Image (tube, rainbow, N blue to C red):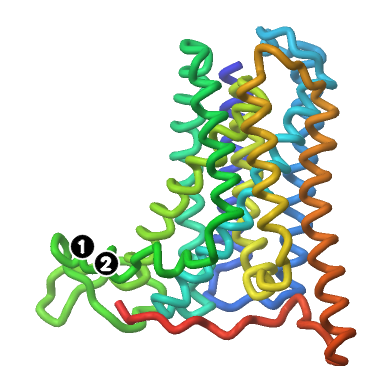
Amino acid sequence: MIWFWIGFFVLVAIALTLDLGVFHRTPQEPTFRQAARRCAVWVALGLGFAGPVYLIYEHDWLGANASGLSGHDAAITYVSAYLLEEALSVDNIFVIALIFRAFRIPAKYQHRVLFWGILGAVVFRCLMLGGGVWLTRKFDFVFYVFGAYLVYSGLGMLRKEDDAEDQMERSAAARVLRRFVRIVDGDHGGRFLVRDPHGRRALTVLAVTLVVVELTDVVFALDSIPAVLAVSQESFVIITSNIMAILGLRSFYFMLAGAMAQFDYLKYALAGLLVFIGAKMIGHGHVHLPNWASLSIIAGFIAAGVIASLVANHRRAAATGAPGPGPGDDAPPPTAPAV
């Protein structure tokens, strides 16, 4: 199995090198059309990896299929976990947009922050998923704990208002960092580390933003890690699907960040999805749901949230007689204190 892990991470390294070293060598703001094309490439790469997963498990290459999972079930499980992580990333995209606006990060530098942020997320997700798999295999009661937490999180999404900007306390994070390291303001050409007027090394606001983005991803992983463990505890399947999903987060951000306000009902769909996954974990030893049924329910929740939002937008536009906002339109940035 070690060779498949090596091959997968080589593929990830090549994709990230091409992304930053070739396609984004100079800082620039991508257009909506460019972001959409890159999204299509990342989604095709992510879903296409289900093919190698099928072959590995179906033919037991190099003795990789120690669990006895069929290729068909492995591929369906992979796609389910991939779609689940993509869906749960929607809230993450919205919060990242608030962070960039609060720290006043120019759009041409946002891709650089997201690149390094996602690289860190890959490392954290591998550690957290590996630990989660170990826990669920060692202690059966963990399923009930994770399941109850997901149900609570899903119901919490229905209760709370969109006050994420107040809850993130970005300026507080900056003040804490200032106690331990030097931070310089201003535009420094997209660099994270510079020298201050006294010749001492100092972090830029871009570096502070990267720290906050990393911490935000860890917080969101508290939902997504238990959720994906409800789909499967097969390490190779869930780790590869999770990483392939977050690799495309940058392109999804540039395509969706300005249009998040249009998806009014997506939050309710995600809440229902978390409750469903939580209930599935709680009943894991009593109720068996086929993999294809789980995939259908996950895709159904996502599709219902998107379709309901689009229908609501169309009705509002028809009622006011004005065209609804386009997918590339950006909402006015919220006011936020400077760092």
Residue at position x 14%, y 64% from top? 179
In this view of the protein, can residue 8 be seen by the observer? no
Marks 2,1: beta carbons within 8 A: yes
Residue at position x 12%, y 75% from top? 199
Q: Position of residue 233 (x, y in %)?
A: 61, 21
Choose top left, top right, bottom left or bottom right for residue 1. top right
The kind of residue tagged 1 is: Val
Choose top left, top right, bottom left or bottom right for residue 245. top right
Q: Position of residue 196 (x, y in %)?
A: 17, 77
The kind of residue tagged 2 is: Ala
The residue that label 1 is drawn on is: 176
- Is disc 2 surrounded by few (<14), some (14 to 19) or many (20+) residues within 10 Å? few
Q: Quadrant of the C terminus?
A: bottom left
- The alpha-carbon separation of the residues under discs 2 and 1 comes to 6 Å
The residue that label 2 is drawn on is: 172
Q: Say whether residue 236 is left or right of residue 195.
A: right
Q: Say whether residue 179 is left or right of residue 335.
A: left
In the image, 82 versus 147, the foreground residue is: 147
In the image, 247 versus 276, the foreground residue is: 276
Q: Position of residue 177 (x, y in %)?
A: 22, 62
Q: Say whether residue 99 is left or right of residue 43.
A: left
Q: Circle 1 — which element?
A: helix
In the image, 331 versus 12, the foreground residue is: 331
